[in-house]
Image (tube, rainbow, N blue to C red):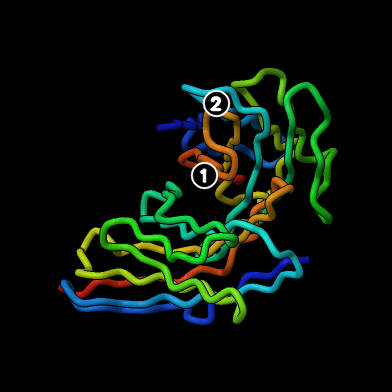
Amino acid sequence: AQTVTQSQPEMSVQEAETVTLSCTYDTSESDYYLFWYKQPPSRQMILVIRQEAYKQQNATENRFSVNFQKAAKSFSLKISDSQLGDAAMYFCAYRRVTGNQFYFGTGTSLTVIP
Amino acid sequence: GAVVSQHPSRVICKSGTSVKIECRSLDFQATTMFWYRQFPKQSLMLMATSNEGSKATYEQGVEKDKFLINHASLTLSTLTVTSAHPEDSSFYICSARGQLAGAYEQYFGPGTRLTVT
């Protein structure tokens, strides 16, 4: 079974600074999808960014970007110019191309310090 | 964008009673819906996957007779917690996939907090 590991249960960052959240995964598949989801205190899951494994180029979405290292099975999320609204739980997730199931990491709680 | 709603947002029920949670895709047809359970400060645990018109597929360790899932239409799935007990208290989240929602994405509902007293 696929596993997704987030080794940082908690992180903090000063407002306007940059923070990187780590994620590693285990798979024998060559093609798959990776995601970062944000869960604010409202508990609504919000898609932050996604990456298709066949694409070498790292995905970016405004202040959010990923560092996708396929050989190392690493998928970190970089948040630039951190804002107070970025404070949330962040989950890394994996999905096979042919399957439906998402595999979620245990999450990283991000605090933004004003 | 694709919107998924859940009702109710929170519910309190007495031990031994049943409670139904609805999950609706508002602007797309959800061929597949998923039900997750999330304990405080923990990750989402997939409970079951349901496809419209067919029986749900339950994850290992999830009691299918206790957590009844019905996906009767392309826009509605329901989760019924039967004979609820305090240990069933949790946050339940549904998500949905459909062609309009994208080939690889799931869209999540806002969740339902169930408290069993």
Q: Amino acid at mark 1?
A: Arg
Secondary structure of residue under mark 1 = strand
Residue B7: x and y in percent read 51, 29
- Residue B27 left/right relative to B87: left
Say which mark, if any, is on residue B113.
1
In this rendered view, identify the residue nearer to me: B80 or A31. Answer: A31
> Which amino acid, by three-letter code, is at mark 2?
Arg
Query: What is the distance, in whole Å, between disc 1 and disc 2 at their CAs?
Result: 16 Å
What x and y, as percent, mark residue A39? Answer: 42, 56
Count all numbered tags in the image, as a single digit. Answer: 2
Give the letter of the chain under mark 2. Answer: B
Residue that appears at 47% across and 60% down: A36
* Name of the residue lying farthest toward the top: B73
Query: Pointer 2: what residue?
Result: B24
Q: Is residue B84 above or below residue B25?
A: below
Q: Observer-nearest residue: A102 or A33?
A: A33
Residue B39 visible to the viewer: no
State if disc 2 and disc 1 touch (CB < 8 Å): no
Task: State which tag comes first along the sequence, 1 or 2.
Answer: 2
Please, what secondary structure does the residue beneath circle 2 have? strand
Point out residue A66 in the picture as x, y percentages from the top left corner: 41, 68
Instruction: Tell if the residue under mark 1 belongs to the same chain as the one under mark 2.
Output: yes
Q: Is residue B46 left or right of residue A20?
A: right
Residue B73, picture quadrant: top right
